[in-house]
Amino acid sequence: MNPRFIFETFLKLLPYLTVTLEYVSLSLLFGTLLGFLAAAAKLGRNRPLRWLANAYTTILRCTPSVVLLFLVFFILPAVMRNYLRINVDAWPALFFVVVTFTLFLGASQSEVMRGAYLAVDRGQFEAGVSVGMTEWQSFRRVVLPQAFFFALPNLTNTVIYLFKEGSLAFTIGVVDIMGKAYLVNATNFGLKALDVYLALALIYWPLSVFFEWLGRLLERRFGYTQVKPEAGKTAESVRGRGRSSIRGVRA
């Protein structure tokens, strides 16, 4: 190992981190929206939509991400060209990466959101309606903050997973930090592979830790309120009562 070469490679990779963060943020945004729609279909009363959402989730969850990436990269242009008369051959490869991980995340996020919604007691929603809220207000102000809290750990795992799994983007020509590391290694004929990929790991490790820390920070922000022990009561009894109230829920 050559520490100087590792540091130089690290500096070469850093500018391409913006490409990685770009498709991670876009995929997370669109994947969350798609997951919300799929979760709504699963929880709805429309049987065809519910069946379609469940089939979509099953198929996508059973498809390896690298296989899905190549399917989207090779099939989507043909479909758009032959049926929609849209030529996407000149479109950047980043577009296909975002589409792939949007589809992939939509399937997993739908289950996360469905589970988070079902974790909130139905009585919470009914209590909001009973005090004069509309159904939408009760969902937005009572159910949604609690569901968001229940979904936070899985959302954090999703961000970290996407950040790491996005390294597959270089297989279709996207030059992100992984793609640049591959090129640097190729220019050195593979003789510096250990140094190159160690420099790459020095980017993945701290950022993954940062995402985990940010998730825990959000959990504390939207989590349970802290209740101070009262005279004559044990900390355990008070702590148990404190778990019943969730910060951020407003009547």
Image: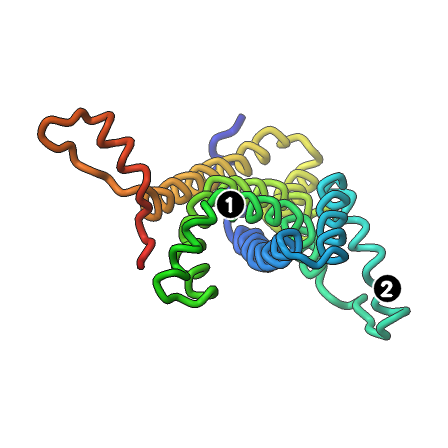
Question: Quarter of the image containing the C terminus?
Answer: bottom left
Q: Which residue is mark 2?
A: 79
The picture quadrant where one finds residue 182 is top right
- Of callouts 1 and 2, the N-terminal one: 2
Q: Residue furthest right?
A: 82
Tell me the element at label 2: helix
Q: Which residue is nearer to you in this view: 229 or 19?
A: 229
Q: Is residue 215 above or below residue 129?
A: above
Q: How is the image coloured?
A: rainbow
Tell me where residue 22 appears, x and y as whole percent: 56, 57
Check disc 1: other Cα within 10 Å, few if <14, some if 14-19, many if 20+: many
Q: Is residue 175 visible?
A: no
Tell me where residue 236 appears, x and y as whole percent: 24, 25
Q: Residue furthest bottom?
A: 85
Q: Residue at x 81, y 50 (%)?
A: 71
| Amino acid marked by disc 2 | Val
Q: Which residue is mark 1?
A: 116
